[in-house]
Image: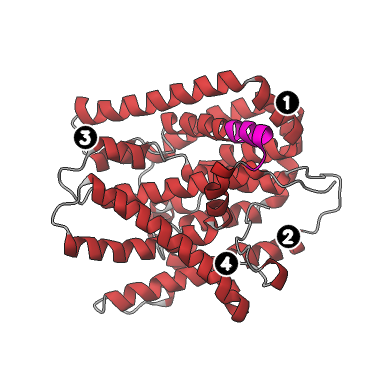
Amino acid sequence: MSKVHVYELDYMRAVAMLGVIGIHTGAFSVSNPDVNVHFFGLVDILTRFSVPIFFFISAFGMFLNYDFAKSYDYLSFLKRRISTVLVPYLAWSFIYITHQYLVDANLPTLTLPELGNILFFGLGSFHLYFLVILWWFYILMPVWRMVIPVIINRPVLYLFILYLLQTLFNYYSTNLIHANTGIPWLDTLITYRLNYLILHYLFIFLLGGICGALYPRFISFLTTWRSAILAAGILSTAGLLGYYYELIYGQSYTCINAVFTLHQLHPLGLFYTLTITLLLFSEFHRINAKHGTHPLLTPLRLLGENSYVIYLVHPLFMYYLTIWINAHFSVISVPVDVFFYIAATLLSYAFSRLLSGVITYAPVLSILTGISFKPSTASRQQTNISS
């Protein structure tokens, strides 16, 4: 059975990408001692679904109409993922490491063990850990091929159990585990566990795989339970914001302390991610089914098609935007934050489109995007790491 193109995934990928830029805009906004807590809540709390949704999308694409009875070539699968994920990850890691040494001449010489740690844990830049976790999910493809057919037999029951186990594990990992064993290598593994341990995102990944494997049933579920999904999305959003404001005004947390508490692995964050994932897919499917490729969704489609490179490059533009803004504005107000967000998004998108054109003449640069240059598809440079 040939795979259909699920446009909902393009739109969700774009929303997730905008959310990631929002999270990093929130980090920029707290440079203002009087940061607007409402703006911060919008860009850094309500966007916490962004990274988990990327795992949902990746698994969904992998198992969309997947034939589990068909013979499976694991090495061929890994070879494709090496070119689309591992090679771009290494390329961009070295770009960011080199950039750090160019802007800070006082950094000590990087040793091979230190470089190994950086690459293993995704420390080349603060956002690259996503590709490390995604790579581990891909390496374990044989496990998912065994697990998902079992879950398919009773998806609601098994996913509910997985959800409960995920909540418990995330709480344990983020609140009760500390790197104080006295064994250096083990303490390092514990310290950076959020950068590589797939168990933190196992539920949302398997949910994506199940929804893709049961695509017709999933669409039927979204249609039948649309009102309930909408209500759950509103409820989870209200709960997340309510607790955020309780932390800010009731317990006098700073914005930074609040986000370190109320993140995507928090029980409220996990419930919010689940409901927003279903809500976004439901609403995009409804619009797409009713209007087709609606013109209002064109910007999301374009962002979705270019989201991979946008994700990889946007911290570089944010770095130089920060320098420029600090040189021209004495106060980081909300309008400045909004400008920062829009400028980072547009510059990253422009770079992605520019890179697409340059690859036409310098195919070697395709290592930055994970695609093989084909003249007939040069304008569509987005690497679909979810398929």
- Front label number (1 vs 3): 3
Of mark 1 and mark 3, the one earlier in the sequence is: 1
> Disc 2 or disc 4, which is closer to the eye?
4
Q: Please report whichever mark, 2 or 4, sits nearer to the chain's N-terminal start.
A: 2
Structural distance between the alpha carbons of marks 3 and 4: 40 Å
Which residue type does callout 4 highlight? Answer: Thr
Q: Secondary structure at mark 4?
A: loop
Q: Nearer the viewer, mark 3 or mark 4?
A: 4
238, 142: nearer the viewer = 238
Q: Label 3 sits on what residue type?
A: Tyr
Residue 77 shows which numbered tag? 2
Judging by the rendered image, the residue that carries numbered circle 4 is 369
Q: Are marks 2 and 4 in contact (CB under 8 Å)?
A: no
Question: Is tag 2's residue or tag 3's residue first in the polypeptide sequence?
Answer: 2
- Which element carries disc 1, helix, strand or loop? loop
- The image quarter containing residue 385 is bottom right
State the residue position of label 1: 154
Predominant SS along the magenta part = helix
Q: Residues within 10 Å of mark 2 (few under 14, many from 20)?
A: few
Spot occupied by residue 382 in the image (x, y as percentages of width and height)? 60, 60
Nearest to the observer: residue 151 or residue 347? 347
- Residue drawn at point x = 58 percent, y = 37 percent: 203
Reply yes or no: does residue 284 show up in magenta.
yes
Classify mark 4: residues with Cα within 10 Å, few (<14), some (14-19) or many (20+): many
- Between circles 4 and 1, the one closer to the viewer is 4
Magenta residues span 281-293
| Residue at the front extreme of this rendering | 295
Where does label 3 land, which residue? 253
Q: 369 above or below 289? A: below
Residue at image coords 38%, 52%: 191
Residue 322 in the image: x percent, y percent? 26, 61
Q: CA distance from mark 1 to mark 3?
A: 42 Å
